[in-house]
Amino acid sequence: MNVFSDLVIFFNKIFKIYRFNSKRFIERKRVRKISLIKDNISKINNIVTVTSNMDSKKHVIYIHGGAFVLGVSRRQEKLLMKIKNKTPIYLSILDYPLAFKNNIEDSLRYLEESFYKLQRNYLNHEFIFMGDSAGGSLVLLLLDRIKNKISNKYKVILISPFLDFNLNNSDISKLQNKDPVLDVSVLKLIVSKYIPANSVLSPIDVDLCDVDVLLVTGDREIFYPDCLAFYKKCLENRCNVIFYKGTKMFHDYVLLDCNQSRKTILKIIEFIEKI
């Protein structure tokens, strides 16, 4: 069984490396149309906003993962629908410019402009910034730019966030063979093409002092050591942080349909509803 698992992981790595080096992959259209969310939708400048039928001021701003190269997936849409069906919220999905035709500054510029538009349109809303994987890193970098210009109270939900673009944590190598989703070599390739070499951007160093934060991670993903380090840093900086670990779970496990995922989604909803 262990030999079989090792072979699956090995061929998965080979496929990923080929895929991300493929000119066809880099040049193909990567933004998929939002298809599962149909009701009460408005779309302006690549901001998809789903309004609430109830009198709610809770407003989730979602920045999707996908290693900076993929648009919103069906699994991500299903996660958002599960949350929205359980609690009355407004939901805005920010469809940011992707690598490799854009770099991270292009993405952050779009996200910043999009947030200011949302803040003008929804003056009294309490925003919940939510991102998974690469989206989690963009949430943090966006907040680092706008946190002094946010009018109202806000919260942050980070799901398996990509926190250190250098992937320097020595404990990452211990988890590489346990993580069937992420590969260090592929991530470094993407980072080299998306983030300028002289960039000082570092999501793990963003200070969220006095902010309510929910941090979700699996303990078998290569981002787990950095998530643990970020959690400790949040505590030192007086963040009201909740650390939720999926036992024997890998990267972005919340997107799966399993018991651990369902429990975690309930925690996310509870966090959103908390006053």
Image (spheres, helix red, strand yellow):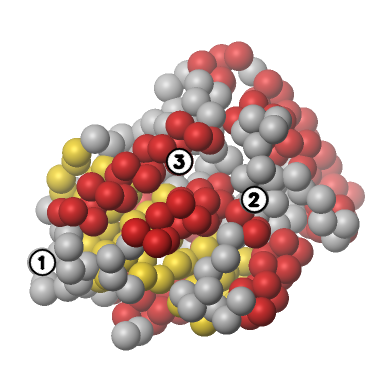
Residue 182 locus on image (x, y percent): 69, 46
Q: What type is the residue that disc 3 sits on?
A: Leu
Which disc is residue 53 wearing? 1
**In this view, 77 is above or below 104:** below
Callout 2: SS:
loop
Q: Are marks 1 and 3 in contact (CB under 8 Å)?
A: no
Residue sitting nearer the eye, 264 or 240: 240
> Label 3's element?
helix
Please name the residue that numbered disc 2 is placed on.
202
Q: Residue beneath label 3, please?
A: 108
Mark toward the start of the polypeptide (1 vs 3) = 1
Question: Which SS class for mark 1?
Answer: loop
* Residue 236 in the image: above or below residue 14: below
Q: Quadrant of the C terminus?
A: bottom left
Name the front one of labels 2 and 1: 2
Contact? badges 3 and 2 (CB < 8 Å) = no
State which quadrant residue 8 falls in: top right
